[in-house]
Image (spheres, rainbow, N blue to C red):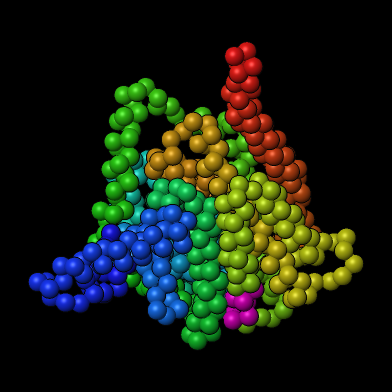
């Protein structure tokens, strides 16, 4: 490194020409050595070239090489963030689709019962419409996992998105249908299409997102559920306002059109969506050659995995119970479409917030604990929504809003934590962490969820019609209370399992050191 006099712009000879300063060179060398000697002593003998010296002002002086290195690192960090954004920008249309498809989906539960009851269809009959929607979601969830492996995630996704758009438009057109059995038959025909296409879309979406972000699955699932909850919240509010502005079909047409805005963009970036499927084919080939392939259906006899699936199924059982019963029970309050939509808005706003809370607990490996808490939240919700017959007060709109808060928080905890712990359990059982595993998990999750939501609506509609809403809610309350001990047992199992693994790892880490002690003594 050059001496300090040269670095600060001083001549090595302190003036004079090259021909006349021969004697001055000795003086310059002496001065440079003196400066270097002083600098080394002032910096505890460290290398002068690697030391930061004070300048003439108050700011420290840095070596030009270090400054260039620092600037290069900052530029590299900026470029890295930009590259990450460009790499994952293709996910933004999927976010748009999830939000607005959820918004369109939210129109069915609060507004279809109004149309059906006004056309002479009884509650238990249009409850079958909701159930059949879930039946074909069940068929779609089983089929979608196989289709992802046989074709591509993009094909499944676009089939689901386009099909659900057609379903939304047709469901809005039911407004011009004759009443009675004709309307009931057309409704059933619509839900055949809607159920299958909706699950094709959901299975492919969850599989791609959870494969793309393996380190943040809890946060990703929570984010997707936040989009679902916020989409339902916005859809319920917009739907009520648009129906008040004109009639039943308007929100179905408007939101259905918005969902299709991302369709051409997703088709354009199909290669990005399919890249994980191509990587998966290579991984599967290697696995089969190694003889390590085994059926995923063995997971279905694992007690912990089954408990996770049952826990998340409870959230859809609640949805199935509310579909034919909640809106008719609010008729006593004589609510407008906007206020009616706000009841569902509170539920889905709480669901969205609860999704982030559940994602945080899942990220820190506390899924089983918070799923137990979520189960307790839903018990409280059905304790006050009626309210329960043994409580000494009558139903008010304030109690309905409070129950929707607990419902949203509890449902998000059940679904997000159950899903995340199910993924963790699959990996613990030795299955690879890849698209095929995530596709099977998303298909299984929706199969269990849809099965619960499929069975509940006709039973709920019949019970509420027979005993009234206040006593009828005790059916849902009892189911949740019965399953609560299972969530407690699942949490305790995870606690003991974590302690057991911690003790084993501590024993392994202390083993070599314990063996080293005696050997050193013998030496």
- The answer to whether residue 309 shows anywhere in this view is yes
Location of residue 286 with respect to 452 vertically, above or below: above
Tag count in the figure?
Answer: 0
Which quadrant does the C terminus fall into?
Answer: top right
Q: Which residues are magenta?
A: 337-344
Residue 458 included in the magenta stretch of the image = no
Residue 338 included in the magenta stretch of the image = yes
- The answer to whether residue 415 shows anywhere in this view is no
For the point 41% across and 63% down, the residue is 38
For the point 63% across and 72% down, the residue is 346
x then y, percent, for residue 359: 57, 56
Extreme-bottom residue of the structure: 245
Which quadrant does the N terminus fall into?
Answer: bottom left
Location of residue 56 with respect to 479 vertically, above or below: below
For the point 46% across and 33% down, the residue is 431
Query: What secondary structure is the stretch in magenta mostly built from?
Result: helix
Location of residue 254 with respect to 385 vertically, above or below: below
In front here: 136 or 372?
A: 372
In front here: 380 or 198?
A: 380
x then y, percent, for residue 272: 29, 54
For the point 35% across and 63% down, the residue is 34
x then y, percent, for residue 325: 66, 63
Extreme-front residue of the structure: 23
Extreme-top residue of the structure: 522
The answer to which image quadrant residue 157 occupies is bottom left
Location of residue 378 with respect to 63 vertically, above or below: above
In front here: 128 or 210?
A: 210
Extreme-right residue of the structure: 392
Residue 195 as seen in the image, left or right of residue 394 = left
x then y, percent, for residue 290: 34, 23
The answer to which image quadrant residue 319 occupies is bottom right
């Amino acid at each position: 490194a050059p001496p300090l006099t040269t670095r600060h712009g001083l001549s090595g000879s302190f003036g004079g020409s090259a021909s006349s300063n021969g004697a001055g060179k000795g003086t310059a060398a002496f001065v440079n050595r003196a400066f270097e000697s002083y600098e080394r002593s002032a910096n505890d003998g460290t290398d002068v070239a690697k030391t930061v010296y004070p300048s003439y002002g108050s700011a420290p002086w840095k070596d030009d090489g270090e400054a260039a290195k620092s600037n290069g690192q900052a530029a590299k960090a900026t470029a890295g963030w930009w590259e990450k954004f460009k790499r994952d920008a293709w996910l933004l249309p999927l976010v748009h689709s999830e939000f607005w498809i959820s918004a369109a989906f939210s129109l069915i539960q609060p507004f279809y019962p109004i149309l059906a009851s006004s056309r002479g269809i009884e509650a238990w009959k249009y409850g079958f419409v909701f159930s059949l929607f879930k039946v074909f979601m069940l068929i779609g969830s089983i089929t979608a996992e196989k289709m992802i492996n046989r074709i591509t995630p993009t094909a499944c996704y676009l089939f689901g998105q386009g099909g659900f758009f057609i379903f939304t438009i047709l469901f809005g057109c039911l407004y011009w249908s004759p009443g009675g059995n004709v309307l009931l038959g057309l409704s059933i025909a619509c839900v055949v299409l809607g159920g299958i296409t909706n699950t094709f879309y959901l299975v492919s979406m969850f599989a791609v997102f959870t494969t793309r972000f393996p380190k943040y699955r809890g946060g990703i699932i929570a984010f997707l559920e936040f989009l679902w909850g916020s989409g339902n919240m916005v859809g319920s509010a917009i739907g009520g306002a648009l129906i008040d502005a004109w009639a039943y079909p308007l929100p179905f047409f408007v939101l259905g059109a918005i969902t299709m805005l991302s369709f051409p963009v997703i088709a354009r970036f199909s290669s990005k969506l399919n890249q994980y499927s191509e990587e998966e084919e290579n991984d599967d080939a290697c696995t089969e050659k190694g003889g390590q392939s085994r059926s995923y259906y063995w997971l279905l006899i694992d007690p912990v995995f089954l408990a996770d699936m049952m826990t998340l199924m409870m959230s859809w059982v609640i949805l199935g119970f509310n579909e034919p019963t909640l809106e008719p029970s609010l008729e006593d309050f004589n609510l407008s479409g906007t206020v009616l939509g706000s009841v569902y808005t509170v539920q889905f706003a709480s669901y969205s917030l609860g999704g982030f809370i559940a994602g945080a607990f899942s990220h820190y490996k506390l899924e089983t604990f918070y799923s137990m808490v979520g189960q307790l939240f839903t018990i409280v919700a059905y304790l006050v929504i009626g309210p329960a017959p043994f409580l000494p007060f009558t139903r008010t709109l304030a109690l309905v809003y409070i129950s929707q808060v607990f419902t949203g928080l509890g449902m998000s905890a059940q679904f997000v934590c159950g899903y995340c712990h199910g993924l963790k359990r699959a990996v613990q059982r030795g299955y690879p962490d890849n698209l095929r595993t995530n596709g099977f998990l998303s298909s299984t999750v929706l199969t269990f969820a849809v099965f619960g939501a499929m069975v509940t609506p006709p039973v709920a509609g019949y019970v509420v019609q027979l005993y009234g809403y206040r006593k009828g809610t005790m059916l849902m309350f009892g189911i949740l209370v019965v399953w609560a001990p299972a969530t407690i047992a699942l949490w305790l199992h995870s606690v003991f399992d974590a302690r057991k693994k911690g003790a084993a790892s501590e024993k392994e880490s202390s083993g070599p050191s314990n063996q080293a002690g005696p050997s050193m003594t013998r030496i």
